[in-house]
């Protein structure tokens, strides 16, 4: 079972935050939630300094102060993050069903990509596949 705080959910839409958090809570999984790129960077840095890295990171592509793609690139290329987060699974979320965003996310080494609105069964299946549940 996943321990408290081992999932980072970066999503600026409050209804999507609540929806995904509800699904995780029903599985007895707690997530740290960030609504901006700046909040996510703080949580990532804190996880490294406290030696408690996330097992799964869920990133919305469009954020009010940047993009999930920028965070993904930082996690996968910046030496401080890369050392800790190379094995971590990353799911990208977007309302944009566009090949450009999909291809770009995979080129930056995301592991999975979900288009909003997120379907509960699809999300649960993905969590099961990556052995979070």
Image (spheres, rainbow, N blue to C red):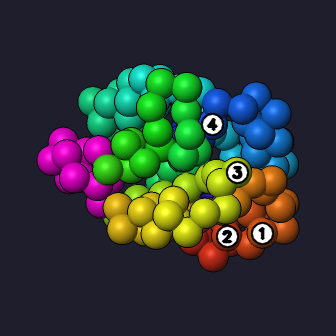
Tag 2: Cα neighbours inside 10 Å, few (<14), some, or many (≥20)? some
Q: Nearer the viewer, residue 98 or 68?
A: 98
Residue 6 seen in the current view: no
- Which tag, 3 or 2, sits closer to the chain's start? 3
Distance in Å between CA atoms under marks 1 and 3: 15 Å
Distance in Å between CA atoms under marks 3 and 4: 12 Å
Name the quadrant containing residue 81.
Answer: top left
Q: Is residue 78 magenta?
A: yes
Front position among marks 3 and 4: 3
Tag 3: Cα neighbours inside 10 Å, few (<14), some, or many (≥20)? few
Q: Are marks 4 and 1 in contact (CB under 8 Å)?
A: no
Find disc 4 in the rendering and name its residue: 11
> Does 84 sit left or right of 69 as displayed?
left
* Region of the chain picked out in magenta, as a range: 74-86
Q: Are marks 1 and 2 in contact (CB under 8 Å)?
A: yes
Tag 1: Cα neighbours inside 10 Å, few (<14), some, or many (≥20)? few
Find disc 2 in the rendering and name its residue: 126
Name the quadrant containing residue 127.
Answer: bottom right
Image coords of residue 40 (percent x, y): 46, 31
Q: Secondary structure at mark 3?
A: loop
- Which tag, 4 or 1, sits closer to the chain's start? 4
Q: Nearer the viewer, residue 92 or 88?
A: 92
Q: Secondary structure at mark 4?
A: loop
């Amino acid at each position: 079972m996943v321990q408290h705080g081992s999932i980072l959910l970066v999503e600026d839409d409050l209804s999507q935050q609540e929806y995904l958090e509800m699904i995780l809570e029903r599985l007895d999984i707690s997530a740290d939630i960030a609504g901006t790129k700046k909040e996510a960077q703080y949580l990532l840095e804190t996880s490294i300094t406290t030696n408690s890295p996330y097992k799964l990171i869920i990133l919305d592509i469009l954020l009010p102060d940047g993009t999930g793609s920028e965070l993904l690139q930082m996690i996968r290329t910046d030496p401080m993050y890369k050392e800790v987060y190379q094995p971590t699974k990353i799911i990208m979320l977007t309302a944009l069903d566009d090949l450009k965003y999909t291809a770009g996310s995979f080129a930056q080494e995301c592991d999975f990509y979900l288009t909003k609105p997120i379907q509960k069964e699809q999300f649960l299946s993905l969590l099961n596949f990556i052995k979070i549940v």
